[in-house]
Amino acid sequence: RELIPNVTKRTLMDLAAWERGGPNDPTVVFANLREVLYLVKEELSPWGWRAYAMEFRERMKAEKKLQALNSLPDSGAEPQDGVVQGTPLWQERIDKMLLVGHLKKK
């Protein structure tokens, strides 16, 4: 007796079959899941949060420093020059400040 109409036993066997490394391969699925779980574990670990908080504080400190430098007269960073928070030029200067700070620590 057929459980599902219009489906033969051979069709069910084809669906259940999987090739090694193919999309139905459970080892591929579990390897991907293991990788994602490792990344989540790193983000949720106390060390991951400590590193994230430290990077955030450094970025806020660099942004405040850049704002203070930009507020000086003749700083070359006037709004008409395109150095406004959120622009690519602003981001480039922040990144340079963070890199210099990182290299000074080393």
Image (tube, rainbow, N blue to C red):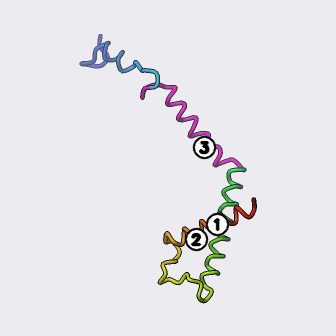
SS for callout 2: helix
User: Mark 3 highlights which residue?
Assistant: 39
The reply to whether dot 2 and dot 1 touch (C-beta < 8 Å) is no
Callout 3, which amino acid?
Answer: Leu
From the image, state whether disc 2 or disc 3 is nearer to you: 2
Q: Give the number of the disc on residue 93.
A: 2
The picture places residue 2, in percent across and down from the top left corner, at: 29, 13
Give residue 3's quadrant in the image: top left
Give SS at disc 3.
helix
Of marks 2 and 1, the one in the foreground: 2
Quickly name the residue at label 1.
59
Q: What amino acid type is highlighted by mark number 2?
A: Arg
Q: Residue 27: within the magenta?
A: yes
Local packing at callout 1 (Cα closer than 10 Å; few below 14, some 14-19, many 20+) is: some
Which is more toward the observer, 15 or 42?
Answer: 42
Q: Magenta residues, as a range?
A: 22-46
Q: Earlier in the sequence, mark 3 or mark 1?
A: 3
Which residue in the rendered view is the most extreme toward the top? 1
Q: Which image quarter is the N terminus in? A: top left
User: Tag 1: residue type?
Assistant: Arg
Corner quadrant of residue 24:
top left
